[in-house]
Image: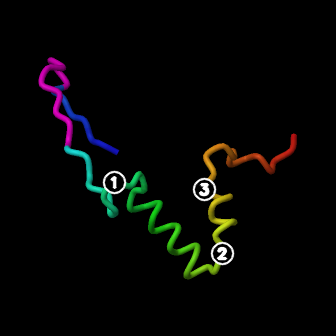
Amino acid sequence: MQEVASCQSCKIGIATATKAATPIAGSFLGPRLLAANFVSRFNDGLPYYRIKKKNDPRRSRNSSLKF
């Protein structure tokens, strides 16, 4: 996430912070997702296919709830 700030009274001079560097150059993974995947794999012992399924953006978080 990039932080954006401006003067509240005049809304002129919007300043945007520089984007944080990724841990792996050229990767789309941020430090939080990378750390979560390492913990899931090596601390929790989840197999790769379950980590991939957990991080799938097409899968909604509440897909298991039935109304």
Q: Earlier in the sequence, mark 3 or mark 1?
A: 1
| Residue position for label 2 | 46
**Depicted 2 relative to depicted 50: above or below:** above
Magenta segment boundaries in residue numbering: 8-17
Q: Quadrant of the N terminus?
A: top left
What amino acid is labelled 1 in the image?
Answer: Gly
Mark 2 → mark 1, Cα distance in angstroms: 26 Å
| Residue position for label 3 | 55
What residue appears at the point 61 percent right and 79 percent down from the top-left corner? Answer: 44
Q: Secondary structure at mark 3?
A: loop
Residue 65, x across and y down, in percent: 81, 47
Q: Secondary structure at mark 2?
A: loop
Residue 35, x across and y down, in percent: 45, 68
Query: Horizontal placement of 36 versus 12: left or right?
Result: right
Q: Earlier in the sequence, mark 3 or mark 2?
A: 2
Select label 3 or label 1 by which is in front: 1
Residue lying at the far left in this picture: please name it: 13
Residue lying at the far right in this picture: please name it: 67
Residue 40, x across and y down, in percent: 58, 73
What amino acid is labelled 2 in the image?
Answer: Leu
What amino acid is labelled 3 in the image?
Answer: Asn
